[in-house]
Amino acid sequence: MIYRYDFGTPLETGAIVSDVPVCSGDIRHFTAETDSSGPVSLTIRPGRDDILFGLGETLRSMNKRGYLYRSWNMDDFSHTENKHGIYASHNLLLFTGECGLFGVYIDDPGDVRWDLGYTDIDLVRITSVNGNFSCYIIEEDSLTGICRTFRKLTGRSYIPPPWAFGYIQSRWGYASSEDAERVLNEHRTRHIPLDAVSMDIDYMDRYMDFTWDKDKIPDLKKLCADMRSRHARLIPIIDAGVKQLDGYSVYDEGAEKGFFCKKADGTDFVAGVWPGYSCFPDFFRPAVRTWFGRKYHAMMDAGIEGFWNDMNEPALFYTPEKLQEMRNKARELLKKDAPLTEYETLKHIGSDLPNNDEDYRRFYHVLNGKTVRHDTVHNIYGAHMTMAAAEGAKSFDPDKRFLLFSRSSFAGAHRCGGVWQGDNSSWWSHILLNLRMMPSLNMAGFLYCGADLGGFSCDTTEDLMTRWLQLGVFTPLMRNHSALGAREQEVYRFSTWQDMRSVIRVRYALIPYLYSEFMKCALTDSMMYRPLAFDYPEDPLACRVEDQVMLGEDCMIAPVYEQNARGRCVYLPEAMLMIRFRSPEDADLIPLGKGHHYIDLALNEFPLFIRRGHIIPLVKAAESTDDIDTSSLFLYGWIEKDTSFTIYDDDGFTTAPDLEKGLRHIQVSIRDGKAAAGSDGLSLSTDHLILM
Ligand code: MIG
């Protein structure tokens, strides 16, 4: 059941796709407090042990209890525990425990504060700073059910092409045809699987969107074709800001048509980002989205099939106004023989420049014909850039899937693309952060997601890279990305690259299964990654596990995330078969009972747990998704009686996938202590089934 309550004058966020009538009377579960100055708060006193899940892309634990979060999309490359939010706002929070079982979604495009027991451990206070929003209360009989209903409210998740499940190598600094080809060569000569190379901002001509530097990439079409012939693809980045430069067609057109965000005086708002002073497309207007979306066509014409959209919070390095203020203040300080404290002040003036709240109040959008100031709709900007890109893909070829992932997002963008988790660091704690964010992103509908494997900022280490890849095997987006200046971390740079290759090869052996699970989840509004509490709500130990996650219908994952650990403790909420992988061809099968286990895991080993009674198929590893042979399946599982399982497959192309048509049911029967499986046109190996 969904209940909707409106406060103030709600603004259209683009998140909601179904009509829910507005309820009158008191809001369920919460007490609403309105403040004449604008803010509206919803409060509730959950039981001390009640658990809160959700908030999508936020830091800290899966159980969000006990901290203060803020929905305010922010370009922040330091993902430390003291932060209240990062690039995205996913305003869905689930409650389970004495206070009941329900979800609350705050459809507010502006600043929202989530005091989840920070001020008072027993009090939850959700505050909309502007007080204009719709609140949806979702009641179902399970956490999974609440998330499914949320998806009914906000629409089906984005479906990527199957090659998006391949391994992607990226680095800030890749700029040219030679860079892309070198990376591909290094992988192919060593037989390290690879499906795509992603290009960062340096490929562009002076950081201008939709251009490419002809000295670095003389023939994009040829580059794409050459890479395709070697079963790989190129994924360029596109930033939100458009360089303000006369003669640059994207700028000229946008300025002439009035498509950029404006200041109060009607002139275009400009801020400095990578290209220098830039203008920001007003993505909320359908005409602007159509225009910007079509700009992607030139690269699609050349053969590009995937893009990543960045800097769309939008990130602002500085505005001319703020810069002037800083100059004035600095001049003041430098005039006199200032004491040291004033130099401290000087330092702060500088660090105040980027992403400044005052700058976010300096420009306006047109949303549904109404002029709105940016800060009141800040959190839906990036989502609308994703929508523009998705519309562009659709107008280019309505029957083809493109890979799109974005840094900033809001509910609604999950229909149009995936997300990556932004600028993490090469820290061990960020493996865990990667893991914990997957289920909460899934709750909000973002199924296609993943983090920069190996870590973006800081220098990675060989063991960190290995352990992180071992988690990346199970994330839909499996991309190794790092920052300019950080240690180079392509797999082939390391002495143990063969072990890392084995990890990636396990990924390729699992791709048909992962794709199948992903598609089943997308087509049934389910979650591919879930906290254990979603599947074992009656098991109090399972409900508090923060370092293991359920994967699809059949599996659980538990990565190693500590340096020098040679294994870890794992809690099994039921009996499971552990596959301890060293490579697809070299793995131990160990049946384990419910309870706590210490699992020995050398650096080149990592586990996958399959629920007893379930079967998953693996295939022979390949060097690209093009080369995967899905006609021979190797079945893994621990079963005691005849068992069936289903896998989904399709042409990977259609934008209208049909679940029923794509499902294949496979029956495994046990006769005289031996398993036999049959299915038309498939060769099935039962050698890896444990029977007892
Ligand atoms: O200000 O394009 O999150 O992945 O490498 C940094 C350069 C801009 C931030 C992205 C990161 C990317 C980087 N970008």
Image: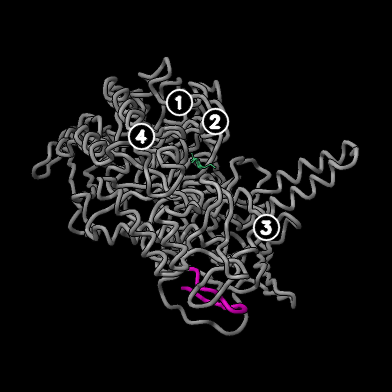
Specify the amino acid type for callout 1. Answer: Gln
Query: For the residues carrying marks 1 and 2, which lies nearer the camera in this image?
Result: 1
Q: Earlier in the sequence, mark 4 or mark 1?
A: 4
Q: Are marks 2 and 4 in contact (CB under 8 Å)?
A: no
* 520 to 643, vertically: above or below: below
Q: Which residue is mark 1?
A: 489
206 on left or right of 649 = right
Q: Are marks 1 and 2 in contact (CB under 8 Å)?
A: yes
Query: Range of the magenta residues?
Result: 1-13
Q: Earlier in the sequence, mark 2 or mark 4?
A: 4
Alpha carbons under labels 3 and 2: distance apart? 29 Å
Label 2 within 8 A of ligand 1 by Cβ: no
Alpha carbons under labels 1 and 2: distance apart? 10 Å
User: Of helix, strand and loop, which one carries label 4?
Assistant: loop
Look at the image and say whether residue 3 sits in the magenta stretch.
yes
Location of the C terminus (image quadrant)? top left
